[in-house]
Amino acid sequence: MSQDNDRPLLVVEDDLALQKQIKWSLDRFDVVTASDRESALAAYRRHRPAVVTMDLGLPPDPDSTGEGFRLLSQLLELDGDLKIIVLTGQNDRANALRAISLGAYDFFAKPFEPELLALTIERAYRLFELQSENRRLQAVQPSETLGGLITRDPDMLRVGRMIEKVAPSDATVMLLGESGTGKEVLATGLHNASKRKGKFVAINCAAIPENLLESELFGYERGAFTGATKTTVGKIETANGGTLMLDEIGDLPMPLQAKLLRFLQERKIERLGGRQEIPVDVRVVCATHQNLKGQIADGRFREDLYYRLAEIVVDIPPLRARSGDAVLLAHAFLRRFAQENKRGAMSLGEDAARAIEAHAWPGNVRELLSAMRRAAIMADGNRVTAQDMGLSAPAAAPQAEDQITAPMLNGDLDLRAIREAAERQAVLAALARTDSNIAKAAELLGVSRPTLYDLMNRLAITTK
C-alpha cells in the first residue's frame, strides 16, 4: 500500500529493531521515527503529525516512565487535539491508564497486532480531522449579529467573535483603533448581540463643546441655566435599558471624567440643576484612537476611570493590515452607491483593484467609503477606474511577500507557517479582487477550482 504523504505518523521507540518493525507494519502511513524525547519534539515540530505512537520507557532511563510522561505532556501542550497512542508492556496497565487520564488517545500492550494498531491510527486520524473541520466551521461561521461587519481577515474575524462572546455580559467594553476602522459598527453589533431591549445611543465626546457636553450626557432640569426652558433627558438616561457608546472618550474633560466615574460606580445620575438621583441600567461601550495610558501618564486621563471602562479591551486592526478587506469592502460599497445613484451594475476595473490594494488608507474604512461614493458618481461607464476614486494607478502589482511577517517557532523561522501565510494572503487578495467569483479567482491564482476550494477549506476562508 502506498504511503499517504498528507498524513505523517510519528513513531517514538528507543528499541531500533522494534522501531523498524513498526515502521514496516504501518507502511500505509508516512512514518517518521524518533528514539528519545528531544528528537521526538524536533520531529513533531518539523512534520506536525496528527497521530503519534510512543513508548513510555525512553532514554536516558528506559526502565522508567519519567521521560515518556514528560514527552506526553509536552506534545499535548503543543497541540491539545494531538492523538497519542501509548505502547506499553503487558503488565503496565496502571501507567497506560495514567497516560489516558493525562490526555492520551488510546494504548496498546506489546506485543500488538499490527492491523489492530493500524485501525486505531486510522480512527484517530478521522477524529482529528473531524475536530479540525469543526474548528474551521466555527471560525468562518457568518455572524448574524455583526451584519455590518464585512471581512475575511483572520484578526478581524477574531474581533467579531470576541464581540459576540462579550455581548451577553454587562462588562464595559473599550474599542481601540485608528479613526475610521469601524468602531461604531462593532459597538452596534455588540448592542444587537446583547439582546438589550433599550436603545443604542452614541455620542462623540470630541464633537460637542465642553460647556455643552455635561448637559448632553446627564440632561438638565428646567431653569438649570439660561435657556433651559424645559426638563431635558440626557444621553445616558436615553440609553436606559440599552447601550451607550462614548466615542472619542480620550477627549472627555477631567471634570466630566470624575462625574462619569461616579455614574459607573453607582449607576445613578443627577441632571444639571436637579437634586434627585435617577437609577440608570445601561451598558457602556467606549472608543478612542488615542493612547489612554499615555494620557494617564501625562495627567490628562484618570487611571481609575480607565480601569472602569477597560474591563474588556478590543484592538481593531487598521484597514491596511486586513488582508484583502480593502477590495472586498470596495465591492460592497460600490454595489450600495451604484444602487443609491441608480447606476445599475457597476464593477471595479483591474487598475482600480490594484490601486485599492496599493493605497495605505490612512483614513481606513471611512476613507474607502468616501472614495467609492465618489467613484459611483464620477465613473463614465459601469467600470470604475483608479482615477474615478481619486487614486493613482500603481506602476506594478504590490509584492505580497514584502507584506508577510514570518511566523516564528521557538525562535526559528517556521517555513510551513510562512507558506501558509503567503497562501492565505494570495487567496484573500484573489477573492477580493474578483468579488468572490471562484472561477475567476482560480484563474487569477493559476490553479483549478477544486484546488482553490481545497485551499480555502484548509485555510478556513469562506466565500460569504
Image: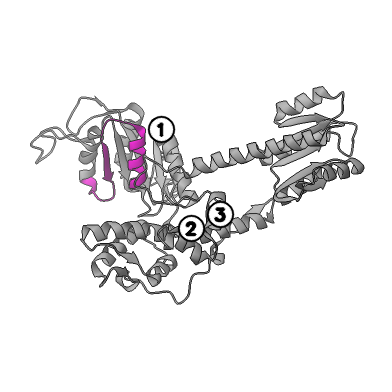
Question: Residue 308: horizontal and vertical position, in percent?
Answer: 40, 35
Mark in the foreground, 1 or 2: 2
Query: Magenta stretch containing residue 393, yes or no?
Result: no
Rendered image: mark on residue 171: 1
Task: Classify 10 Å Cα crowding around label 1: few (below 14), some (14-19), many (20 and above).
Answer: some
What amino acid is labelled 1 in the image? Ala
Task: Classify 10 Å Cα crowding around label 3: few (below 14), some (14-19), many (20 and above).
Answer: some
Q: Which residue is denoted by mark 2 in the rendering?
A: 428
Question: Residue 61: horizontal and vertical position, in percent?
Answer: 90, 35
Q: Residue 142 falls in which quadrant of the image? A: top left
Q: For the residue labelled by badge 1, is the local secondary structure a helix, a strand or a loop?
A: loop
Segment colored magenta:
184-211
Compared with 382, 177 (above or below) is: above
**Residue at mark 1 to residue at mark 2: CA–CA distance:** 34 Å
**Residue at mark 3 to residue at mark 1: CA–CA distance:** 38 Å
Rendered image: mark on residue 439: none
* Residue at point 80%, 26% (across, down): 95
